[in-house]
Image (tube, grey):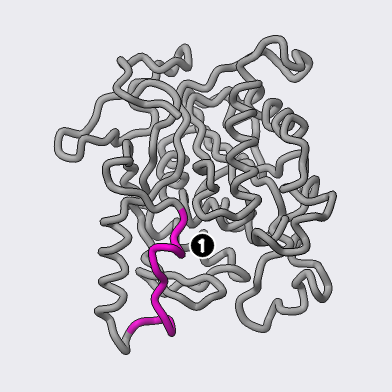
């Protein structure tokens, strides 16, 4: 059950913007579980119901868009269970459930439907996020890079909406009826260091016939892979690996989990990490770990009383 007031009252507040149910658990599940357990106000905004998703197995095959088109409502229940597993109490859909429909993969016919997220007016969608930002007043925002991690239209649009929403939320002249202006101190994009992915794939290939999936994914199948030098922060969620795994299993129509790996509907195995990585693109970086050179806390350097980043700049920027 969503508890918006608790998230807004917490001293530290984290907002995540994702395209579909399941994206949050795959990319940020350990981060969300760790911060929720530490008393951080964690708010998730999901932009669509994921109606165009492919389904794993036969149990829910009737729900796909080409048949009953009932997958979206079912994925609402999967998301609610995933958030329960992560301990996240504040999760919402941008503009309300079903306000914008899943656009499908890039280049398919559904991209052109007038009701899909890809066709949403940017400022109209961003205004829905502004209302959330001004209510919750997060110090930290997490979303995708400009390519949405891997080129999916809804991921690209989620990036645009998140970045535009953060900009407009800080503008006191923009729709003041949505609440007092609020500037987010730090904005991060989801990334995965190339070395980490390569090591995970090497472990999966080494399993040989004991590997849990028919094939092994490639770097191109993993959203947000970057050179290690582009990483600026790491969140060690090892203590919350079980919570992340349980959240991913809750998205049963989309994800098959065989620890320490998982696969999507393509049945290609990928590593299932409990350590998650980020790139700071707005705001001032905080203290870094002496060994890695990365921040070990997304709130590093943030004055939670004022919401402003208090550390000196060191090359962050979009």
Give residue 198's position: percent from left, percent from top.
29, 63
Quarter occupied by the C terminus: top left
Q: Is residue 313 above or below residue 192?
A: above
Instruction: Tell me where residue 106 sits by quadrant.
Output: bottom right
Sort mark 1 into few (<14), some (14-19) or many (20+) by Cα contacts within 10 Å. Answer: many
What residue is rendered at 43% in x and 63% in y?
220
Q: Which residues are drawn in magenta? A: 211-223
Q: Nearer the viewer, residue 89 or 148?
A: 148
Can residue 98 be seen? yes
Q: Nearer the viewer, residue 243 or 227?
A: 227
Q: Residue furthest front?
A: 107
What residue is rendered at 57% in x and 58% in y?
22
Is residue 218 found inside the magenta-colored segment of the image?
yes
Instruction: Determine whether, in the image, residue 194 is placed left or right of residue 140.
Output: left
Helix, strand or loop at label 1? It is helix
Q: Nearer the viewer, residue 74 or 171?
A: 171
Is residue 187 found inside the magenta-colored segment of the image?
no
Give residue 216's position: percent from left, percent from top.
39, 76
Q: Is residue 302 above or below residue 90?
A: above
Give residue 229's position: percent from left, percent from top.
27, 42
- Principal secondary structure, stretch drawn in magenta: loop
Q: In the rendered image, which residue does mark 1 sit on? A: 248
């Amino acid at each position: 059950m969503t508890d918006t007031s608790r998230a807004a009252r917490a001293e530290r507040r984290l907002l995540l913007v994702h395209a579909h149910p399941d994206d949050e658990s795959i990319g940020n599940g350990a981060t969300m579980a760790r911060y929720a357990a530490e008393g951080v106000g964690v708010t998730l905004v999901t932009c669509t119901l994921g109606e165009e998703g492919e389904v794993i197995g036969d149990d829910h095959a009737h729900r796909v868009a080409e048949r009953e088109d009932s997958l979206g409502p079912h994925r609402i229940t999967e998301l609610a269970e995933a958030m329960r597993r992560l301990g996240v109490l504040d999760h919402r859909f941008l503009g309300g459930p079903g306000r914008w429909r899943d656009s499908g993969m890039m280049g398919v016919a559904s991209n052109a439907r007038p009701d899909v997220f890809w066709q949403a007016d940017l400022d109209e969608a961003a205004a829905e996020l502004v209302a959330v930002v001004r209510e919750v007043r997060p110090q930290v925002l997490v979303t995708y890079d400009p390519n949405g991690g891997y080129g999916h239209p809804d991921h690209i649009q989620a990036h645009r909406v998140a970045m535009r929403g953060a900009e407009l939320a800080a503008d006191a002249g923009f729709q003041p009826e949505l609440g007092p202006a609020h500037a987010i101190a730090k904005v991060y994009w989801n990334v995965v260091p190339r070395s980490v992915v390569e090591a995970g794939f090497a472990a999966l290939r080494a399993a040989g016939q004991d590997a849990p999936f028919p094939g092994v994914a490639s770097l191109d199948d993993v959203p947000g892979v970057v050179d290690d030098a582009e990483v600026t922060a790491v969140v060690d969620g090892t203590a919350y690996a079980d919570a992340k795994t349980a959240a991913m299993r809750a998205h049963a129509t989309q994800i098959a989990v065989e620890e320490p790996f998982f696969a999507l509907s393509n049945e290609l195995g990928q590593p299932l990490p409990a350590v998650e990585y980020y790139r700071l693109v707005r705001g001032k970086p905080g203290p870094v770990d002496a060994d890695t050179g990365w921040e070990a806390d997304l709130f590093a350097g943030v004055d939670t009383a004022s919401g402003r980043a208090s550390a000196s700049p060191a090359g962050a920027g979009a």
